[in-house]
Image: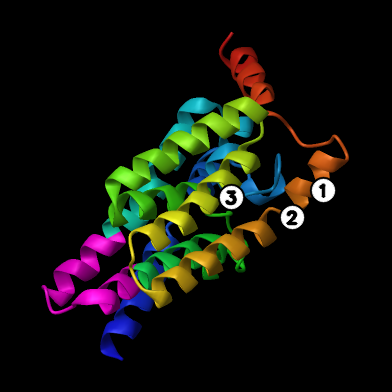
Amino acid sequence: MVYVLTSILVGYVFGCIQPSYFIGKWKKKNIKDVGSKNAGASNVTMTFGWKYGAMVALIDILKPVLSVMTITFLFNGTLQGDFEHFIYYLNGVFVILGHNFPFFMNFKGGKGTASIIGLFLILDWQFGLLGLFLFIVFTLFTSYIVMGAMALYTFFIISTYLLDFGALALLSAAFLTLLAVLMHRENFSRIINGEEKKLKDAFQKNREMTG
């Protein structure tokens, strides 16, 4: 029980680190009131430019990496087998829950795409890099970040199964995928209605901001 509670607490605390929120404060704007109203790297890119977006993405990717490294240090090799994998996945789940539902932002944060990339990389860097490649390819091919995210989450479940990390880890991966679908339901609705901003829109805005 100590392992579970520690994994949950550490994960949620790391997840609540919100670079998009603090950049918005510095720019005297509430990130939840501008653009897509999402506290994530894509909205920061659309609103403040790619340099700030890249900064947010990097920090959000590092959150699960540092969180898993922290519990690995705290537990000091006492975890074994499928339970070890489950604890890492559980920690990642709560990093993303903290990112999506930070207490100091009235539980309204981002959608966790950058953080799932970081979790994937720390769990298995080879599959993680392949997942990142798929995310980039699907995003560029469709010009919708949400489609890249769905490809990434789908591969995350498949990889968890192939790596044989156990049933609890697989359930955790499935939970994160379902959560991602729910968090992106407005994006799907906007795509259907032809209202979703495409990736090229962000590049165009960045050229206007720096031109």
- Mark 3 or mark 2, which is nearer the start of the sequence? 3
At 51% across and 46% down in the image, what residue appears?
152
Q: Are marks 3 and 1 in contact (CB under 8 Å)?
A: no
Label 2 belongs to which residue?
Answer: 185
- Mark 1 or mark 3, which is nearer the start of the sequence? 3
Label 2, label 1: how far apart the Cα atoms are: 6 Å
Question: Which image quarter: residue 64?
Answer: bottom left
**Dot 2 alpha-carbon crowd within 10 angstroms: few under 14, some 14 to 19, many 20 or more:** few
Label 2, label 3: how far apart the Cα atoms are: 16 Å
- Is residue 177 at all visible to an observer of this figure? yes
Q: Which mark is residue 39?
A: 3
Residue 156 forms part of the magenta stretch: no
The three-letter code of the residue at mark 3 reads: Ala
- Is residue 30 at all visible to an observer of this figure? no
At 31% across and 68% down in the image, what residue appears?
88
Give the main secondary structure, helix, strand or loop, of the magenta stretch.
helix
Percent coordinates x, y for residue 35 in the rendering: 71, 39
As drawn, which residue projects farthest toward the top?
Answer: 211
For the magenta stretch, what is the residue range? 67-88
Residue 83 forms part of the magenta stretch: yes
Indicate the quadrant containing the C terminus: top left, top right, bottom left or bottom right. Answer: top right
Q: Are marks 2 and 1 in contact (CB under 8 Å)?
A: yes
Label 3, label 1: how far apart the Cα atoms are: 19 Å
The three-letter code of the residue at mark 1 reads: Ser
Label 1 belongs to which residue?
Answer: 189
- Left or right of 122? Residue 14 is right
Q: Which mark is residue 107?
A: none
Mark 2 element type: helix
At 28% across and 63% down in the image, what residue appears?
68
- Left or right of 67? Residue 50 is right
